[in-house]
Image (tube, rainbow, N blue to C red):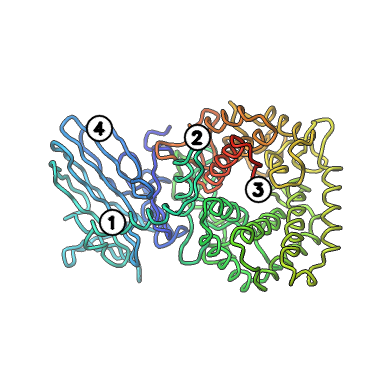
């Protein structure tokens, strides 16, 4: 651990459903992008401990820390205990028309000397700001129509003695002052999250971790458009000191579809409908024939990837990247992901399918028909060229299977559906994958045709209904992946020594893949093994229940944080294991 950087697990997640902040155990806001998730950072110490900027509230003396979210919210409380007293810090992003970071310091007992330091470095640490006093505020003009307004401090760095019962109110507002009544803002924000949470449909099994995961997913949805980002950060490394550092603050069709599946499973149909409305607006603009694998949060199609060479990167892991070149890749699995989500959404809300949605269904199914024989870059977005990935082919089967079911469930569209062609191509995909995608030598489905390399994504083949969970070929695949792709029980997405992916260096184990193995073990009847692995993954979450994209074999968090993929799979595993305990059939996991 580079001494100037905190572990990723030290961070808590704040959201106003437009932007996100990360608050560390030491009281430092080390990440905040305004006004959107994908905007340049205001505080970016996460990616450069010297240039990035932060907003720190910390005791001067040595202290211990306890922290938690207020129940059913994304409002974070951190309690500092020193030899002289106790202070509680409450952090949240204001829910309302204005955007503001709110920090409430309260003396609990004794006296604690606190250091307060607000040091924004806009545009990913490339700019310093000059503060001017105005009407009792400190105001920094960053650029035209962009200013920061600090309230509660006479200067940007000061020391305050906080006594028992004393309250210090701090706000940092974007273009407008923060809320004048900070306690009212706290009540309003708490009410927003509590009201959203009280309608959740939760399993009895690991109920609180499922609720926390649902709150993370809600916090990653960009409320103005309905899109869903894959994570709140960019360039947190998949290997300390490595180069696999990418920007995840965009909306992947695959990730968002899985997020919707998880939200639907906990009873949140409105979020699903909001995302579908966003997708329709994107496709109205671009056309279904140009469907990308990912978009900007307002539907932007151009996400040029570039490096920020002035930043040293988290623990000196470079390059720091913004944008994502994978936006222009071909990934055939998104047709199946999207059609499965449309089918599930309709099954859940029992509403008639609109004519607009039917046109989307038909377009996606026809694309699967026409393109499934082609190679692609696959679910893991390899950058060494296209391959005939088994998972991509199988997801085209899912696309056609769900399109057929949607047409049969909506008789008034049935005559408009080329059902015979869809069935023919669906069956041909199935034959092709069983013939070319399974290796007798490895006793497993492989990552791609003609390869002996395994891919953890093949754990999904039964979960998506492509093959029965009691099929010997699937059972042996689960066991082969468990044998070849695990380190200390946690699952790699593939073996980097046998798979050319166009990247250098290595990476941690992939959190969602470990959780896919939990589901697969439950499916094949190895329930005790499934529960043991589930507990192992949950033990790697931080004290707030948050998980990143990857884990080291020792369980340390790596990659962007918090990661939607990881929390999606937590929800799926909890529901699946509860179903097993009740001797109920396992649900479609999306």
Q: Which residue is mark 3?
A: 588
Q: Who comes first in sequence, dot 1 or dot 4?
A: 4
Marks 3,2: beta carbons within 8 A: no
Mark toward the start of the polypeptide (2 vs 4):
4
Label 2 with label 1: CB-CB less than 8 Å: no
Residue 187, numbered circle: 1
Judge left or right: residue 193 versus residue 479: left
User: Could you tell me residue 403's position as x and y percent?
Assistant: 74, 61
Mark 3 or mark 1, earlier in chain: 1
- 488 or 62: nearer the eye? 488
If you read the primary sequence from the N terminus, does the residue marked by circle 3 or circle 2 appear first? Answer: 2
Mark closer to the observer (1, 4): 1
Residue at point 57%, 35% (across, down): 508
- Residue 445 is situated, as x and y percent measured from the top left of the image, at 77, 38
- In which image quadrant can residue 545 be found? top left
Relative to 391, say whether 419 is above or below: below
Instruction: Give SS at disc 1.
Output: helix
Q: Position of residue 534 (x, y in %)?
A: 55, 33
Nearer-N-terminus badge (4/3): 4
**Distance from Cα at disc 3 to Cα at disc 2:** 22 Å
**Residue holding disc 2:** 538
Q: Earlier in the sequence, mark 2 or mark 1?
A: 1
Report the mark closest to the observer, 4 or 3. Answer: 3
On the question of residue 309 being in view, the answer is no
Where residue 69 appears, as percent x and y from the top left, is 35, 44
Would residue 540 be found to the left or right of residue 432 on screen? left
Classify 175 as above or below 579: below
**Could you say which disc has been placed on residue 63 in the image?**
4
- For image coordinates 29% across by 61% down, the residue present is 173
Mark 2 element type: helix
Question: Would you call the spot at circle 1 few (<14 residues within 10 Å), some (14-19), or many (20 or more)?
Answer: few
């Amino acid at each position: 651990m580079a001494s100037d950087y905190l572990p990723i697990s030290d961070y808590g997640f704040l959201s106003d459903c437009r932007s996100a902040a990360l608050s560390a155990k030491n009281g430092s806001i080390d990440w905040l992008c305004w006004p959107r998730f994908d905007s340049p950072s205001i505080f970016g110490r996460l990616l450069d401990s010297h240039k990035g900027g932060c907003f720190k509230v910390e005791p001067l003396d040595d202290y211990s820390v306890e922290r938690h979210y207020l129940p059913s919210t994304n409002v974070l409380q951190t309690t500092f205990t020193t030899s002289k007293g106790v202070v509680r810090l409450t952090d949240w992003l204001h829910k309302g028309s204005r955007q503001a970071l709110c920090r409430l310091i309260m003396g609990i007992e004794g006296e604690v000397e606190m250091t307060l330091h607000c040091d924004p470095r806009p545009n990913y640490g490339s700019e310093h700001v000059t503060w001017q006093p105005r009407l009792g505020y400190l105001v920094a003009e960053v650029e035209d129509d962009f200013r920061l307004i600090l309230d509660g401090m006479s200067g940007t760095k000061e020391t305050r003695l906080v006594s028992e019962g004393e309250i210090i109110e701090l706000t940092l507002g974007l273009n407008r002052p923060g809320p004048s009544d900070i306690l009212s803002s706290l009540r309003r924000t708490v009410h927003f999250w509590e009201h959203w949470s009280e309608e959740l449909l939760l399993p009895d099994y690991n109920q609180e971790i499922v609720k926390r995961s649902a709150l993370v997913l809600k916090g990653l949805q960009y409320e103005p458009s309905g899109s869903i980002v894959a994570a709140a950060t960019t360039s947190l490394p998949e290997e300390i000191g490595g180069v696999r550092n990418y920007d995840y603050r965009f909306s992947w069709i695959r990730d968002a579809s899985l997020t919707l599946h998880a939200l639907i499973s906990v009873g949140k149909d409105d979020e699903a409908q909001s995302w579908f409305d966003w997708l329709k607006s994107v496709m109205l603009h671009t056309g279904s024939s140009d469907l990308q694998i990912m978009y900007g949060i307002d539907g932007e199609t151009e996400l040029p990837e570039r490096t920020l060479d002035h930043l040293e990167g988290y623990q000196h892991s470079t390059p720091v990247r913004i944008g994502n070149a994978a936006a222009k890749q071909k990934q055939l699995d998104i047709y199946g992901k999207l059609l499965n989500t449309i089918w599930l959404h309709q099954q859940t809300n029992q509403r008639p399918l609109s004519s607009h949605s039917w046109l989307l269904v038909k377009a996606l199914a026809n694309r699967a028909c026409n393109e499934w024989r082609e190679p692609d870059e696959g679910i893991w977005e390899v950058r060494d060229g296209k391959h005939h990935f088994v998972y991509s082919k199988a997801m085209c089967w899912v696309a056609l299977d769900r399109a057929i079911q949607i047409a049969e469930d909506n008789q008034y569209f049935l005559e408009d559906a080329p059902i015979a062609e869809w069935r023919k191509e669906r069956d041909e995909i199935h034959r092709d994958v069983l013939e070319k995608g399974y290796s007798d030598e490895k006793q497993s489905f492989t990552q791609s045709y003609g390869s002996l390399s395994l891919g953890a994504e093949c754990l999904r083949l039964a979960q998506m209904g492509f093959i029965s969970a009691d099929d010997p070929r699937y059972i042996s695949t689960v066991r082969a992946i468990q044998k070849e792709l695990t380190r200390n029980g946690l699952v790699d997405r593939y073996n980097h020594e046998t798979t050319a992916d166009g990247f250098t260096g290595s990476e941690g184990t992939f959190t969602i893949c470990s959780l896919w193995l939990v589901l697969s073990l439950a499916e094949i009847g190895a329930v005790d093994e499934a529960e043991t692995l589930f507990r192992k993954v949950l033990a790697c979450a931080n004290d707030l229940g948050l998980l990143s994209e990857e884990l080291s074999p020792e369980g340390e968090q790596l990659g962007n944080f918090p990661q939607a993929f990881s929390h999606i799979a937590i929800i799926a595993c909890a529901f699946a294991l509860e179903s097993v305990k009740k001797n109920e059939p396992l649900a479609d996991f999306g």
